Amino acid sequence: MEPLLAEAVTVRVGIIGAGMIGTQHARRLVTQVAGCTVTAVADVVTPRAAALAAEVGAAVCWTWQDLVADPQVDAVLVASPGQAHVDQVLAAVAAGKPVFCEKPLAPAAADALRVVAAEAAAGRRIVTVGFMRRYDAGYRDLKAAIEGGEIGEPLLAHAIHRNASVPEGFVGEMSITDSLVHEFDAFRWLLQQEVVAATVVGVRRSPLAPAHLVDPRIVLLEFANGAVLDAESFVTSGYGYDVRCEVVGSRGTAALDHPRATVILSDGRRAEAVPADWSVRFGQAYRDELRGWVAALAGSGAGGSAVPVGAADAWDGYAAAAVAEAAVAAHRAGARTAVTLAAIPAMYR
Amino acid sequence: MEPLLAEAVTVRVGIIGAGMIGTQHARRLVTQVAGCTVTAVADVVTPRAAALAAEVGAAVCWTWQDLVADPQVDAVLVASPGQAHVDQVLAAVAAGKPVFCEKPLAPAAADALRVVAAEAAAGRRIVTVGFMRRYDAGYRDLKAAIEGGEIGEPLLAHAIHRNASVPEGFVGEMSITDSLVHEFDAFRWLLQQEVVAATVVGVRRSPLAPAHLVDPRIVLLEFANGAVLDAESFVTSGYGYDVRCEVVGSRGTAALDHPRATVILSDGRRAEAVPADWSVRFGQAYRDELRGWVAALAGSGAGGSAVPVGAADAWDGYAAAAVAEAAVAAHRAGARTAVTLAAIPAMYR
Amino acid sequence: MEPLLAEAVTVRVGIIGAGMIGTQHARRLVTQVAGCTVTAVADVVTPRAAALAAEVGAAVCWTWQDLVADPQVDAVLVASPGQAHVDQVLAAVAAGKPVFCEKPLAPAAADALRVVAAEAAAGRRIVTVGFMRRYDAGYRDLKAAIEGGEIGEPLLAHAIHRNASVPEGFVGEMSITDSLVHEFDAFRWLLQQEVVAATVVGVRRSPLAPAHLVDPRIVLLEFANGAVLDAESFVTSGYGYDVRCEVVGSRGTAALDHPRATVILSDGRRAEAVPADWSVRFGQAYRDELRGWVAALAGSGAGGSAVPVGAADAWDGYAAAAVAEAAVAAHRAGARTAVTLAAIPAMYR
Amino acid sequence: MEPLLAEAVTVRVGIIGAGMIGTQHARRLVTQVAGCTVTAVADVVTPRAAALAAEVGAAVCWTWQDLVADPQVDAVLVASPGQAHVDQVLAAVAAGKPVFCEKPLAPAAADALRVVAAEAAAGRRIVTVGFMRRYDAGYRDLKAAIEGGEIGEPLLAHAIHRNASVPEGFVGEMSITDSLVHEFDAFRWLLQQEVVAATVVGVRRSPLAPAHLVDPRIVLLEFANGAVLDAESFVTSGYGYDVRCEVVGSRGTAALDHPRATVILSDGRRAEAVPADWSVRFGQAYRDELRGWVAALAGSGAGGSAVPVGAADAWDGYAAAAVAEAAVAAHRAGARTAVTLAAIPAMYR
């Protein structure tokens, strides 16, 4: 049964970062999630914070440090640029306030590990990382099928991650660190295995990709039990947002196919629409991850975990960052690169 | 852009009927809908009302009349048995309180027409009827395709409405009045046409259907512009809940197919799960219709409509009841039966 | 195991009618069917017969009577216009030569019945009627699923039969007598039941249909055991050739879906091609029905049936004609019309 | 238009190898292909040759050398074990008789190259290699989509090749040399590019695979233009025969999906059958490749090519063998291995 708010606990959320994702999350919190209010907003561009604060009925904080310290803020949602995450999350952990941090937890695995260490020292899981696919109905069905034994032992998997196009700021190896990182987390979670090595396979460049991008490419991940994932990343596919996968087991396979839309028969063709972008494809998952977070906060009481069951925690954020780092290194070296993780604190096992 | 609750208006909802659907709606309101609380619950079985009230943090009312009069209740959700709807909705209208009434608005078209008349006399639309399919993404895509001209002029349509099984109390012609009534509303809404006649085609009885049910059968509806719908109703199909349709236009067709789930390949078969029941298939639509209702209430201000744009209103509830009544009559007479509607008040056009 | 031609029997086929379908059949016989040659061709337009004869290495006959009598002709394929069929088939029966007659066996049920009577009097089934769907892999799978009990007792069925467009000569009620007649035969065969009544439901006319056609429409058939078929006929659908159906049983359903083609993802869309016409959709079935016919001829020996197991025989041709006749009458009368069949000779049971 | 046999040329085929595939081809030739007879059969196990010869009305030859020399044999079909192919094909080339050689042309690329050299010296293409996928409607649609520019420039491709199980004699690296070799030819043909390197990626072994097999695994092929194929081979998948692929282009993708069968809705599930094995999935392609071969023979006249347009020739057989050899070497070395082809004779360009 779904958790209810019998005592009308209302969680007061402060939001750091009033850009696209921060704004979307703020709107979701006030219109689609029961049991919470947004009480404070901070952004390095203060007028942007002010606009969002006005829209959702919150106060403006001049700095994120003020926001973390604000007694009107019970929990912090971090939606700033990735490189700012680690200091903000560490501050919230130090203040004992639960955090929802958009992925990545930190671009550098060493930084993410600092969060793990701080949280482990505090002895309580309060950092949730925004890998929303864990809340998608399709991925959940996939995981249930695997764990239900329907396909036998998982042996290998195929994944596709395509975007129609990318915004201007999408540069360098972001197709690994920002896009495929979702697959890194999703397959760790689906297979319940850590990644031990990454290889990047270069393919023919798309003549339509911007000159500064290596696009498309294939990343191979090896998991601790020998399972292998081949994942295609293609961020300028042109035609739409397309995320699919198939997990191959010893007795069958389980696949996440296109979500089916209305079928149009016309002009000699049977056609279904492909989602335009991730907000269409995973809109429901974004909503549900925030609902799960607020419900976990309301129920976490004194000393319990503030991370929803099944959500990504700081360790997951660290592991995904370590895989991404290895994949970028593998790309640069043109060679298979091992992923070496720190020892996992008992709290995360 | 989605409506925001900038001023933190919180709508206080009273719920009449603490059975299955009333309980589900109450839980949705307190966990999945922002901007509302449930403040009162009434049920002819008071202990049942008390249990639900405790769960959602509401007070118990001894009678539904008390609930409608309660100053802590801004809006009323009617989830009692169908025959009780008309008096409760009329009372709410008399009190000037917006109502969300589960379908049917009233089993008898004449009763539904009394609601229309009372509301029209009051001069403001405040009665919303719970035809949740209008909030389903598939139906919305279908409507957009039709209105976007992708299929030319709609000429005819096919519909299937199957349940795996029905509860004990499902008797008489409820496969028309309780199940197919969803198709009656959905196709009026999709085609933007009133129904002018109904015919019921008897088919071979299922040997697995209870003796007191006529199951399956086919209902033909004729619309004002000559379009025809053939709709299969099969409430003891055994295999699952299956709602599909295809609208055939002069240049193409638009179809609502099975929602696609995870695909399992095993044992010589490629299989997708069929939803078990309507709460699985339309869970998201139920949630969104309540969100839409609460948002409309918050935004309705003084004198505006309290019915969300696109939702079914009292006229729609009346028209669906009139079609259902004609279909039942057609079944009994074994003959095509005309649907005669009262004149539509200007407010509903 | 497939029948082999161990003794190298070569069946010599004469073809009456060198129009489109006669030409296609002739080409199939000489290039895709082992064990036969085409030895004679007749057509009312003799130059047309001569051209086809030259192409397939056959002689020209001045009249179809000559062709039936020709000692170089072992078996006759009738592909002339429908109204000519009955005399030609009767002549072949009189000559004791096996016939493959394109549908319809005769436009008038009374004429088809004359063939049945003549053949029954002769005491041997030698007339095969060209209902090629019985050779389509999809229909065969459907029949196997029904007979294998996978769906329980068949109760009702839905069918769609759409053409992109029709040629100039497609007039009157040919959408019933030439198109839907395929469904009439196919569902008699799938359900193993005779049709007892037909009703035609008029729908909104397509603004794109020629003025002389009633298009689309829905035909309802009632079968002897109470099962009902609703079949849509839409011969100017514009978008392609689309034949689908679903048989609904007491425990499940079996459906013939679109044959899947290559899937193209582009321009925001996942698209599969719809066949352009019946020669694309049923090309393989046409080939296999001729292969089945030639194999049956080669194996029929003295006195055995020359109709392949599973193919439509004269009785099937008569029954389909009777259903078509009733459906046309039902359309004209605007009322349900009974189908009354003659007593079936023992030979056909 | 399909080729016709206006002059009733009948090609007399001799078959070397009366095992499973030889027997199937013989039966297809006599029952499903017009314009040919089987006149001679040879097999190292003479009684097996005799049985097949009796079944198809052919003579028995004591040795394959006798068969090649037999004046009653116009063309030779080689269906013996792979290691025997090269001598038999060379003998037929020496005798000037067209050959249809089952894949592989030869297990060793050097042997296949001897065939290429001999044929090039003779100056006429008369060796056809049995890569039947080129005759599959799905693959043909895929190729047409690529060549029609629907997906832009092909950049990479994914392929899956799964068998339910393998026979006893399936050992060593046959999953590369016997199974994936179909993908090696198919993608050379689809992309019109030679392969320049192969890498084999080991994955977690299936606990259900026989101990002597490495199964499943992934093979990466790099093509001359930089395009990459990742191909999964899984010969003990258990659930069925499953061959699919997707070619990813700069503007879209083209995919070969499961062939769709009848859809069964029952027991909470929407299910389609997966083909049991390759003879079900590619039965039509096998038939059509033989029809194409016989038609090419009938039309080849003096000095023309006896290889059907679009079919695999000796060069294709050599190239596929070279890729397979490199993939086996890559597996053994655990490293990327280059594919080095001889210079292509002008005749094959």
Image (cartoon, coloured by chain):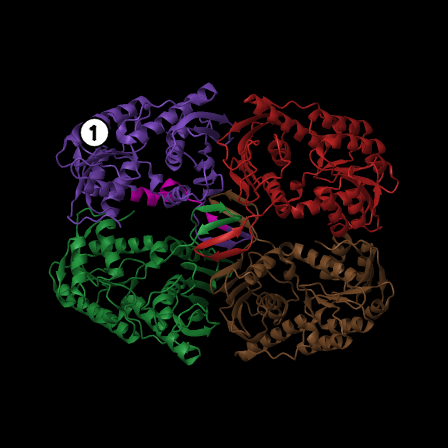
Chain colours: A red, B brown, C green, D purple
User: Can you see residue A299?
Assistant: no
From the top left corner, tell me how far across and down residue C271 is, in percent.
48, 50
Which residue: 52% across, 52% down?
A: A272
Q: Is residue B6 above or below residue B320?
A: above
Q: Residue furthest left?
A: C71
Which image quadrant for residue B104?
bottom right
Which residue: 29% across, 62% down?
A: C130
From the top left corner, tell me how far across and down residue C223 is, in percent.
42, 70
Which image quadrant for residue D179?
top left
Does dot 1 land on a helix, a strand or a loop?
Answer: loop
Residue type of the residue flagged with mark 1: Gly
Q: Which residue is mark 1?
A: D123
Q: Image check: D233 left or right of C55?
A: right
From the top left corner, tell me how far across and down residue A23 is, in percent.
73, 45
Q: Image check: D200 left or right of A33?
A: left
Looking at this view, is C151 or A305 the one in front? A305
Which image quadrant for residue A100?
top right
Badge 1: residue crowd in 10 Å (few <14, some 14–19, many ≥20): some
Does the magenta segment cover residue C296? no
Which residue: 70% across, 70% down?
A: B82
- The range drawn in magenta is D271-288
Looking at this view, is B333 or B30 the one in front? B30
Looking at this view, is C207 or D279 the one in front? C207
From the top left corner, tell me how far across and down residue C104 is, in percent.
30, 67
